[in-house]
Amino acid sequence: MTFNSVVIAQNEDIALRYAVKFFDANKCGPDVGENNVFDWRGPCHIEDGNSVNIDLTGGYHTDGGHVKYILPQAYSASILGWSLYENKNAFEFTDMTEKSISILKRFTDLLLKAYTSDGNFYYQIGLEGIDDVYWGAPEEQDSPRPVKVINQDNPGSDVLGQASAALSLMYLNYKDIDSAYAQKCLDTAKVLYKMGKENKGPYPVKEKYKSHSYYDDLAWAAVWLYSAEREESYLKDAVKYSIQQDLRGNDPLEHKTTMYWDDVYLPTFIKLMDYTRNTRYRNAVEQNLNHWQNEIKETPGGLKYLKKNGVLMYAASESMIALMYSKRTGTSKYIEFAKSQINYILGENPFYMSYLIGFGGRFPDNPYHKAANGKELTDKGKIKGPAENLLKGALVNGPDIEDRYINDGNSNRVALEYNASFVGAVSTLINNNLINGIYE
Ligand code: ZN
Ligand code: CA
C-alpha cells in the first residue's frame, strides 16, 4: 500500500525527542516542576510512603491515572536503559542523552527507595480502586495512597527481576558520571536478584498488571548482572531461566507474542545471542519475527495487530526486537517490517493519523491522562473534547483493526511502557541508520 503523505522516515529524530520528553508529564513527587518540559505540571503526592514511615515519593505515574505500579515502571526503565546503553549515538544525535539520563535516574531513585534494609520491597504506591474515582490533576489529589509490599515470605520474582535489570543498566549507563551512585544501583540490583531467585514466584497482583511469568524477568536481571560483572554464575542462571515456561505453559523458544512489561524473553534472547554461541536464541527470535510477518493479523493499512489493548506498544516492541536482531545478524530481512510499523504510528496510514501526540498535522487530542486533561468527563465516563494541555510525545493505544481511531475509552490510553517501547524502536532505528551511514 502506498501513501501520499510526507516522507515520515526523515523525521524519526523529532519523534524520538518528543517520545523521550513525554516522561516529564508523568513525574511524581515534590520536585516535579524542576527540569520539566510541561509547565502545567507541579509537585504531587508528596506524602507517598508516609503510612509506613518510608519516603516513597518520586518516580512516575504509570499511566493516565496516578498509581505507581513498579512492575511496568521498572520494565520501562530497563527498556529505556537498554536503549540508551546500546543506542548511545542515537541519543547523542538527537541531543537526548542528558534528558534520558535524568529520566532513568528518577526511575532508579524510586527503585532504591522501594527496597528497605529490613528486606521489604514496595511494589505499588496508590490503589486503583481509590485512584479511579478521582478525575482531576495529580497536584490536587488528596486521596489515601496505600502501599503494597513483598518480602522473604511473599515472592515477587517478576517485579524484583525487572527492578534489578533497571538498576544494573543504570550502573552501566552511569558509572562514568557518578561511580558511587552507580555502585549503589549495582549492589541493590544484586540484592533484589537474589531475593527473587531464592523465593521464586509471581508477585501477588491479581488485577491490573497481573503477571504471567517470572523466569523471564530473572533471566533478564541475570543477563544484565553478567553484563556488569562478567561473573559466570549470572550467565549460567540467565541461560537456565530463559528457557523456562511461563505460567500459562508457553515454550519461550516458540514465542508467539512480543516484548512487554509481562514478558521479556525476547530481549533476553537478544542479549544471550551476544554472550553465548548457542544458536537456539537466534532461531527463537527468528521464528518469532517470522510469526509476526506471516501469522499475525494485519489492518488494511499494514499495522500488525496482536491485541486491541496495547496494539501500538506491541508493534513498537516487535520493531525494536527486529532492529536489534538485524543489527546483530546483518540481515536486512526484517528492517522494512520495523520501518513500516514505526511509520504507520507516525502517520503513514489510511487516515494520516499520527499516534504520537503533537507529531505531524493530525493526532489524538483527548488522551486518557488526568494531568493533561483538565476537563470534566461525560456522564458515561468518556472524555469531553480536547484536553486542556497538549500531552506532547505520548504514544496512545492506537486504532482498531480497520485502521480507525475511535474514542472508546481505550484507544486513547497512554502509559510509560507504551513510550518505552516506542523510544526503544525509534532509537534503535536511528542508531542502525547512523551505523549504516544513512544520515548525511
Ligand atoms: Zn504524583
Ligand atoms: Ca515476566
Image (cartoon, rainbow, N blue to C red):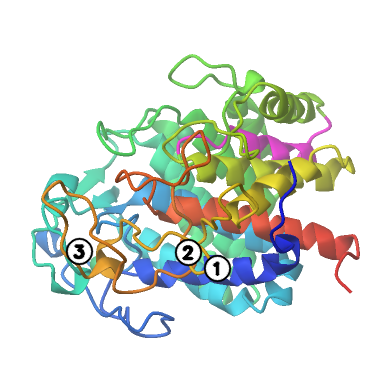
Q: Which mark is residue 170?
A: none
Residue at image position (64%, 72%) is 14
Query: What residue would you read off at disc 1?
Result: 361
Residue mark closest to the camera, 1 vs 3: 1
Query: What residue would you read off at disc 3?
Result: 54
Query: What residue would you read off at disc 2?
Result: 357
Point out residue 212 in the picture as x, y percentages from the top left corner.
41, 27
Residue at image position (41%, 36%) is 157
Residue at image position (67%, 53%) is 343
Asked whether residue 265 is drawn in magenta, I would say yes
Residue 233 appears anywhere in the view: no
Residue at image position (51%, 29%) is 215
Query: Of helix, strand and loop, which one carries label 2?
Result: loop
N-terminal label among 3 and 2: 3
The amino acid on which the numbered mark 3 sits, given as a three-letter code, is Ile
Which range of residues does the magenta coloring cover?
262-277
Dot 1: within a 10 Å radius of its alpha carbon, few (fewer than 14), some, or many (20 or more) residues? few
Point out residue 320 in the picture as x, y percentages from the top left corner.
67, 47
Cα–Cα span, label 2 and label 1? 10 Å
